[in-house]
Image: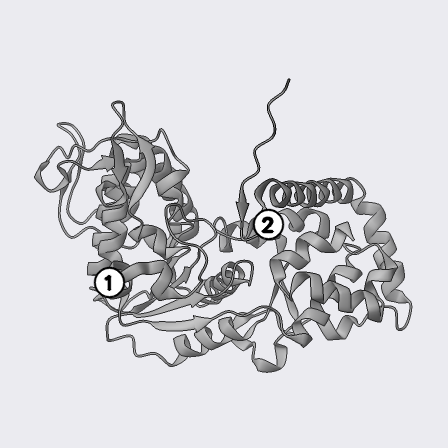
Amino acid sequence: MAAPMRVFSRKGITWHCRRAAHQQSKAKYVAHTQRYCTSTSETESKSTDSVATPGTFKQDFFRATENDPTNQTLKHEGQFYSIPLDQVKSILPVGTSTKWQRLIQPFQEASIMVRRPALEVINYLKQADYTNPPVKYALYGKKGSGKTMSLSHIIHYCHSQGWLIVHLPDASQMNYKFKFDYIDNYSYKDSTPYECMYDQPVYAAEWLAHFKQRNHKFLSEITTTEAYIWSKRETTEKGEPLLDVVNQGLKRPKNSCDAIGVILKELEHHSMSGKNRILFAVKTVNGLFAPLTNIRKPGGYVIPVAELTLNMHFKNFLRGNWTNGAMVMTVDSQNTRNQPNHDFKPLHLLQKEGFEFLDPFVPIFVDNYNEKEMESCIEFYRHKRWIENDTVVTEDGRKQLKFLTENSPGLLTMMSPTM
């Protein structure tokens, strides 16, 4: 006789039922996306015909007239603006929302909603005094409220203003995604500062590739302030372009983590000249202050986050011992490990160590959609035929959709095509 199925309960809700419902909803979402992609041409023709019909869609309601983040104001709040498809890889090569990336192909458009938290930070950046150390802005909110997309909006603004962008796509990925990506650190010049530390060459090489793609024009102009010895035969002399350091990390992945440390150190020196403004953007910054990784060495030793070389380099840059720039980060419970996730406030997720490390910082609350943003998003999805059921866009259907999603941007994206 088969053993009875174990049921794990928490607060009266069974674990297996919640997981099955989540997997079923996710499967419907993925299937709808694939079905949508195969019929893109047919969808575009239908949407064109629909827009031509007067009164079918409130196109002026959800579409922003200004695509330049510099000129966007509160009158554009709740409206979508578009990034040219040929510029997405240069503006936002990595670190955006997974749902947003999946919708670019079927929608044939890279659209971001103009929201108040992003406009607030952009306004602060316009009025900041860049002769002082960088101000830290922390975006926080509930899971799926749009923190990552607000961060992407801010990055787009800084890119349009010619800032040098140092982007850490997800600080928590270093702790759990690259489970077998670790080697004992060894610095050829002096191994003492990195004793008992661990490198992550695969992750570091990927980060360098994206950093080079985004800031190539700056790397040829910035020069090193001292010489760096990589091996007996390889040396980066004083006064050489910083691009040589990046290429050293790409050609020799063993040196990639040390190359990132050198780059961040040189950017601190370069910021004092005032030539290029620097944005340090971090998603899930509380991942830098997590206690443990999921990297288990032979013998059972679990590597602490504090013993990762990359964690040390990025935390040193996060101290803000430089000028002519700003730091914008998100505090998120979605992608963290070994951290409490029932509260979304910075003090709870950062814990005492992280909160005191970042203090002082400016907290920016990212709430779920308000009424205007919710209506705008529904009309946008209807225009793109992401919502195919006509009953959903009726008055009763909209009320049910708002009730089920709680005006959450993430839930709205996943639930709209399945209803």
- For disc 1, the neighbor class at 10 Å (few under 14, some 14 to 19, many from 20) is some
Residue drawn at 50 percent across, 71 percent down = 118
Residue 125 found in image quarter = bottom left
Q: Quick one: which residue is furthest to the front in this view?
A: 1
Residue 394 found in image quarter = bottom right
**In terms of depth relative to the viewer, which is nearer, 248 or 196?**
196
Q: Secondary structure at mark 2?
A: strand
* Left or right: 387 in relation to 16: right
**In terms of depth relative to the viewer, which is nearer, 359 or 277?**
359
The image position of residue 1, as x and y in percent, is 64, 17
- Residue 54 in view: yes
Mark 2 and mark 1 residues within 8 Å of each other at the beta carbon: no
Q: Which residue is mark 1?
A: 357
Earlier residue among tags 2 and 1: 2
Q: Amino acid at mark 1?
A: Phe
Number of numbered discs visible in the structure rendering: 2
The numbered mark at residue 411 is none
Q: Amino acid at mark 2?
A: Ile
Residue drawn at 20 percent across, 50 percent down = 224
Residue drawn at 89 percent across, 66 percent down = 52
Q: Secondary structure at mark 1?
A: helix
The image position of residue 34, as x and y in percent, is 73, 40
Residue drawn at 30 percent across, 42 percent down = 292
- Residue 279 in view: no
- For disc 2, the neighbor class at 10 Å (few under 14, some 14 to 19, many from 20) is few
Residue 62 found in image quarter = bottom right
Q: Which residue is mark 2?
A: 13
Q: Quick one: which residue is furthest to the top in this view?
A: 1
